[in-house]
Image: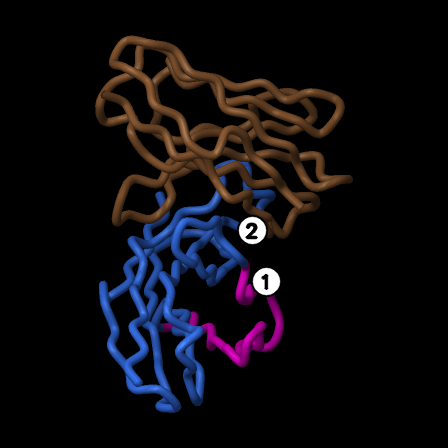
Chain colours: A blue, B brown
Amino acid sequence: AQSVTQLDSQVPVFEEAPVELRCNYSSSVSVYLFWYVQYPNQGLQLLLKYLSGSTLVKGINGFEAEFNKSQTSFHLRKPSVHISDTAEYFCAVSDSGGGADGLTFGKGTHLIIQP
Amino acid sequence: GVTQSPTHLIKTRGQQVTLRCSSQSGHNTVSWYQQALGQGPQFIFQYYRKEENGRGNFPPRFSGLQFPNDSSELNVNALELDDSALYLCASSFGEDNEQFFGPGTRLTVL
């Protein structure tokens, strides 16, 4: 069975500072990895995904993530955050064999941007 | 994109509810998730070409349908208080499992 651990439930950051949101996963098979963002009272929007190839993945809104197979991690980073980045961020994993078991999500990290 | 109806719904314990979703055009797979307050979404089940082909740890009183016109339903019988949550529909196409989410239906069970 797969599991996802998001190590921080809340991350406060000052505006224009860099941020890293941590994600570790547990799986015995080859995986696909995703980061989604959820703004208040909305659904989830895909930020980026790792399927294969380069371990550094670039997404929307200036976010990027690095896949580290040996550490089973997929941390999300942004070099300079804005007030509009305040939201809930979810890391998710699925196996790479077609995904009939859906996505397994972490509990989320609330990113709080302070002016 | 993916749309869901209704936006909000209030039911009482023991009742039945039907939630609806319209998938993104061309997507052949629809998945449903339950997101309790302060938690990440949990996978309920997935439908591919009108057949359930994957299910999470949810009891049989959670059931679904997928229709040829890209729409789908989630049905929940014998509602319990713990069923109160945001229900998310997601559609996808292909094997990379990138899922496109709707805005969700907020279900409150009293």
The chain carrying label 2 is: A
Amino acid type, mark 1? Leu
Q: Identify which residue, B18 or A27, lies in the foreground.
A: B18
Quadrant housing the C terminus of chain A: bottom left
Amino acid type, mark 2? Ser
Left or right relative to B31: residue A37: left
In which image quadrant can residue A85 be found?
A: bottom left
The residue at 46%/50% (across/down) is: A42
The residue at 39%/90% (across/down) is: A16
B23 to A55, vertically: above or below: above
**Badge number at residue A78:** none
The chain carrying label 1 is: A
Residue position marked by numbered label 1 in the rendering: A51
* Residue A52 among magenta residues: yes
- Secondary structure beneath label 2: loop
The residue at 38%/64% (across/down) is: A87
Q: Which residues are magenta?
A: A46-70
Left or right relative to B86: residue B91: right
Q: Identify which residue, B31 or A67, lies in the foreground.
A: B31
* Residue A80 among magenta residues: no
- Secondary structure beneath label 1: loop
Quadrant housing the N terminus of chain A: top left
Q: Are marks 2 and 1 in contact (CB under 8 Å)?
A: yes
Left or right relative to B16: residue B84: left
Instruction: Report how far apart the C-alphas of labels 2 and 1 lie in the structure.
Output: 8 Å
Residue count near mark 1 (Cα–Cα under 10 Å), binned few <14, some 14–19, many ≥20 = some
Residue position marked by numbered label 2 in the rendering: A96
In which image quadrant can residue A7 be found?
A: bottom left
Query: Which of marks 1 and 2 precedes in the sequence?
Result: 1
